[in-house]
Amino acid sequence: MASLIPCPHCGQRPKEEFTVKGAALARPTPDAGADAWFDYVYLRENPRGRYDEYWHHTSGCRRWLVVTRDTATHEIEGARDAAQKQDAAE
């Protein structure tokens, strides 16, 4: 069975319509030091379990989403529009 992603704009869609772009990390402030920016750009955790990632609905609404996925089982917990504030999603 194909994996389905719950796009908040298009409904359940096959994962093949999306492009995974990486971890949805908090961006440092513009005046943050070089070390903070280096860590943000180049260093990544490889956690086991629940993880937020940026996905682009390339073959659909073309919106950026934050998809919550379990890295161990690849189960999708949910998705929200990337423009939506994090605290509003909880």
Image: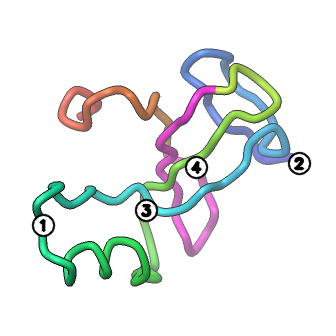
Quick one: label 1, few (<14), some, or many (20+) residues within 10 Å? few
Q: Position of residue 46 (x, y in %)?
A: 47, 82
Q: Nearer the viewer, mark 2 or mark 3?
A: 3
Question: Where does label 4 land, which residue?
Answer: 76
Q: Is residue 70 magenta?
A: yes
Magenta highlight range: 63-77
- Going from N to C along the chain, the mark reached first, 1 or 4, is 1
Magenta part mainly helix, strand or loop?
strand
Q: Quadrant of residue 41?
A: bottom left
Q: Which mark is residue 32?
A: 1
Q: Is residue 43 magenta?
A: no
Q: Position of residue 79 (x, y in %)?
A: 50, 36
Near-viewer residue (81 or 48):
81
Q: Amino acid at mark 1?
A: Ala
Q: Nearer the viewer, mark 1 or mark 4?
A: 1
Q: Residue at x 29, y 30 (%)?
A: 89
Near-viewer residue (28 or 23):
28
Q: Amino acid at mark 2?
A: Met
In the displayed structure, would residue 1 be above or below residue 75?
above
Question: Where does label 2 land, which residue?
Answer: 1
Q: Nearer the viewer, mark 2 or mark 4?
A: 4
In the displayed structure, would residue 50 be above or below residue 63?
below
Q: Amino acid at mark 3?
A: Tyr
